[in-house]
Image (cartoon, rainbow, N blue to C red):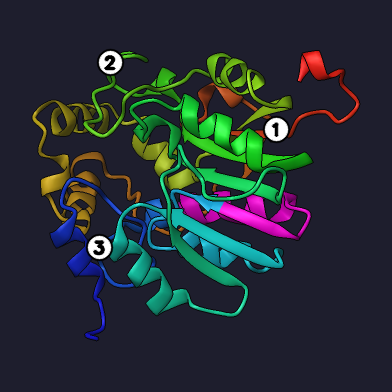
Amino acid sequence: MLRLRPEALIDTYPEHDFIVAEGEVSSPYMVSIHESFYRYAAGQIPGGVVVDAGCGTGFGSRLLTEQANLVIGVDLKPLLLRYGRQEYGQQNLSFAAMDAGALGLDDGTVDAIVVDELLEHLPDQRPFLSEAARVLKPNGVFICATVNGTHTFGTLHAPKNRNHYREYTSGAFGRELLGYFFEVEVLGQELGPGFERYLKNRRARLLEWLLIHLNVKHRIPPRLRQRVRSFLSGADPSEREGFPVTNRDVERSLYLVAVARGVDPAAPACER
């Protein structure tokens, strides 16, 4: 079987940007912010069995293996799973083609579920959240990242991002998850200094608005987008930076991170 190159993923699925750490198809900024989330998530999991829901190429799944006994990367796109097996295959990492709304796993068998920017991409997020609550062990941990709809274009229920069905404020995010889990805490990811300078630039903000409203953002290669952004704003968002997860200034974070627990085993059955 021929070895898959990152460019083949973009050619096959041109409607999406994928986080591929290798090659030139993902911007350093995007790799950095997702890497920061996965490293934070790895520090929160108790070991055991971890599901990476909507794993894509498995970039983050591999990072979770540093703490988990077994990571199961779940996605519906076979070419992404094939790439993950090719690049990240190891003894405690497996990949499975599953619908997030119908996980083929037994009740209460998973110690942690990690979800990196999946909820906004699902036409209906409720079946997945129900499945996540079902397969999670009592007091298992659910760690989920999503964009902060307060700072994106469009409205929460009519986002301009062509791949999003909904976006959340920090309050709405927490309330959504409280319908399925308990002890929900909503955090944010701090911006790296380079990208923060970029976002404060008025010309850069206008550029992002135009790219989205003209529906051309994803037609421009990431490296070219970076050069244009740097030229217009004088700020370079291309450097690898840390984007730590913190409870400081959550409302102004571009990305929200929720940490929740499974059903409280001490709660009466009628309250579960």
Q: Which residue is mark 2?
A: 158
Q: Quadrant of residue 23?
A: bottom left
Q: Position of residue 54 (x, y in %)?
A: 44, 48
Residue at disc 2, secondary structure: loop
Residue 39 among magenta residues: yes
Q: Residue 260: which disc?
A: 1
Name the residue located 61 percent from the left edge and 25 percent from the top edge: 249
Name the residue located 38 percent from the left edge and 78 percent from the top edge: 86
Mark 2 in CB contact with mark 3 (< 8 angstroms): no
- In the rendered view, would you say 28 is above or below 254? below
Range drawn in magenta: 32-51
Q: Is residue 256 visible?
A: no
Q: Which residue is mark 3?
A: 25
Mark 2 belongs to which amino acid? Answer: Ala
CA–CA distance in space, label 2 to label 3: 28 Å
Mark 2 vs 3, N-terminal side: 3
Which part of the image, by quadrant, shows the N terminus? Answer: bottom left
